[in-house]
């Protein structure tokens, strides 16, 4: 019996696909290496300006035909500080936060007070007293007294 086994090694399509795969792998490795080189270089970190302060200081000053008038320098007390406005805004912001927190604090205190007071569970007291009344004949005075003490301590909570 003769079997006609397909061999990949004799097919030109296999070689074309292998060449394309090899070229794409080389391109991928080259691209990754180039990307890492660009990422590590400082080429894109700082863009140099056309005119830097050093360039401006080197230029000679052009004398003007008008006389230079010196303006009086106001005293430091009269100069409003530029940061003063931002400090006031920051202080107002912080005060607003504190006011909001104090409002939350009062609301939480009210909630805690209402929860701690709680609603007296009248159903429990009524059922407890009904059970005592139904068992009154079979209970002795000590058990009745103990149950009433328990009910009173529960209602006081």
Image (tube, helix red, strand yellow):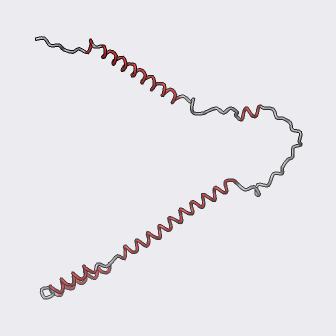
Give the x, y percent position of residue 76: 76, 54
Residue 66 or 148: which is nearer the viewer?
66
Question: 81 above or below 42?
Answer: below
Quadrant occupied by the N terminus: top left
Q: For the point 50% across and 67% down, which residue is it?
A: 102
Residue 27 or 67: which is nearer the viewer?
27
The quadrant where residue 57 appears? top right
Q: Is 129 positioned to the left or the right of 155 in the image?
A: left
Question: 64 above or below 33?
Answer: below
Q: For the point 34% across and 16% down, which residue is it?
A: 16
Q: Is 125 positioned to the left or the right of 31 in the image?
A: left
Quadrant occupied by the C terminus: bottom left
Q: Is 96 positioned to the left or the right of 62 in the image?
A: left
The number of numbered discs placed on residues in the rendered structure image is 0
The quadrant where residue 75 appears? bottom right
Give the x, y percent position of residue 17: 33, 19
Q: For the point 34% across and 76% down, which residue is it?
A: 118
Q: For the point 77% across and 31% down, which residue is it?
A: 58
Q: Is 69 positioned to the left or the right of 93 in the image?
A: right
Give the x, y percent position of residue 101: 50, 64
Give the x, y percent position of residue 82: 69, 53
Q: From this viewpoint, which residue is outermost toward the left?
A: 1
Residue 21 or 138: which is nearer the viewer?
21
């Amino acid at each position: 019996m003769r079997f006609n086994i397909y061999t990949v090694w004799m097919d030109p399509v296999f070689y074309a696909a292998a060449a394309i795969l090899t070229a794409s792998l080389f391109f991928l490795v080259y691209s990754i290496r180039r990307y890492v080189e660009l990422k590590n270089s400082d080429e894109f970190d700082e863009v140099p300006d056309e005119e830097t302060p050093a360039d401006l200081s080197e230029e000679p000053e052009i004398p003007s035909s008008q006389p230079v008038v010196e303006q009086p320098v106001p005293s430091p007390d009269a100069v409003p500080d530029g940061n003063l406005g931002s400090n006031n805004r920051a202080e107002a912001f912080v005060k607003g936060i504190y006011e909001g927190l104090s409002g939350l604090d009062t609301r939480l205190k009210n909630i805690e007070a209402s929860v701690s007071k709680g609603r007296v569970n009248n159903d429990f007291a009524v059922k407890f007293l009904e059970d005592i009344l139904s068992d009154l004949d079979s209970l002795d005075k000590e058990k009745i007294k103990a149950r009433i003490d328990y009910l009173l301590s529960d209602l006081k909570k």
